[in-house]
Amino acid sequence: MKTKLIILLLLLLSINSNAQQTLTLEDCYSLVTKNYPLSKQTGFIQQKSRYEIDALSKGKLPKIDVNAQATYQSEVIGLPATLPGVQSLNKDQYRATLDINQLIYNGGVIDASAKLKEAQTKTQQQQIEVSLYQLKSRINQYYFTILLLQEKKALLLSKKELLGSKVKEVKSAVKFGAILPASEQVLEAEIIKINQQLTEIKFENIKLLNNLSELTFTKIDAETILILPISNPNYTNATRPEIAFYDLQNEQLEFSKSVISKSNLPKINAFGQAGYGNPGLNMLDNSFQTFYVVGLKANWNVFDWGKNKTDKKALDISKEIVTSEKETFELNNKMQLEELNYEVKKMEELLLSDGEIIQIREKVIKSSDAQLKNGVITSSEYLVELTNLFEAKNILKTHEVQLAATKSNYEIIKGK
């Protein structure tokens, strides 16, 4: 019983190890979003923003400075007459102070600057989203080209298998003198030609898979089977990341205007100074003394020669530029969607006629097969009809892949 169980487990492991790996288009999108180096910048930008906003908020905390100085001057203040108990000042003077400045009101510039920084961060992160989204077009290019190679390979293998069977039939007919020996050689030459085409497909497939592997930063095996995606280009709940990027740019410009507006408001600071020096605040006392000073300071730039107003006008023009870029993008997007929509309709109609052509070709090859067996036609004539049939099948598969690619590109342009 144990022996049977072990054999069964080994068989299951063997089947699992030999199973071919599959890959979907959505898998590729997820891999590039997760692994592409640019995606790491989103977290870095957020962390950088937190530090910068934290640094801005520290502007609300008291500013503390320690100062010390020793000086020697050539002249000092003197009195016109000598007074009892009053000494002349020393030419060497010393002072050490602790200065504290506390912001009380600055018109909300710090808070406005923090909001501007947050808006800048969102804009930068959205720019990364735009760049990552644009990689989808490159993925589509590789993915659907590989899909097309897969379909061509499957058709060639099917044709090769059919010709292999036909060679056996022809050999038997040649043996009995029903068909000339040259017929067998014509079919064998075609098999060699198919092997050449399979070799070309093999190396082209490896090259494209390597490109897809590098783009997604994932090892994709040469035997990996790519799945034909089922697209739904008619859904309406979609927005391109570029649209959000343009909106965030305008929002950032509005916050910049807010910072400019608040920069001209009055600023009030409380300050204090405690010190020890010779002389102190009493200049007539020529000795080391402790002292302190406290007070309020207000500043208001009531006239800036129209600088803020000019800066706001420049920002308004920047908003107009961004809006113009957004409108241009939407117009080009609309034109691309219309072109792809017509391309989808064209492919769908071509596929209908492809099916009809294949049905006719299958009837012709069935007739040619019987004629070859009876020696009515040569193997070369049979090969022509067989090639026509597989060429029709190849065109059908090409149109199917092209239709799927067109629908997928439609989704990307619309904003999947």
Image (tube, helix red, strand yellow):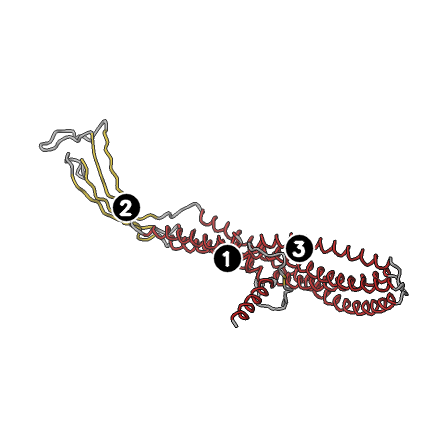
Q: Which residue is mark 1?
A: 248
Amino acid tagged 1: Leu
Q: Position of residue 106 (x, y in %)?
A: 35, 52
> Which marked residue is nearer to the observer: mark 2 or mark 3?
3
Three-letter amino acid code of the residue under disc 2: Ile
- Near-viewer residue (95 or 25): 25
Residue contact at pointers 2 and 1, CB within 8 angstroms: no
Q: Can the viewer see residue 352?
A: yes
Q: Position of residue 257 (x, y in %)?
A: 45, 53
Crowd class of label 2 (few under 14; some 14 to 19; many from 20; radius 10 Å): some
State the separation of the CA atoms marked 2 and 3: 68 Å
Q: Which residue is mark 3?
A: 205
Looking at the rendered structure, the secondary structure element under dot 3 is helix
Element under label 2?
strand
Label 1 and label 3: CA atoms lie apart by 42 Å
The crowd level at tag 1 (other Cα within 10 Å; few <14, some 14-19, many 20+) is: many
Query: Closest to the observer: 313 or 414?
Result: 414
Kindly identify which residue carries mark 2: 64
As drawn, is 167 to the left or to the right of 208?
A: right
Label 1 SS? helix
- CA gap between label 2 and label 1 equals 38 Å
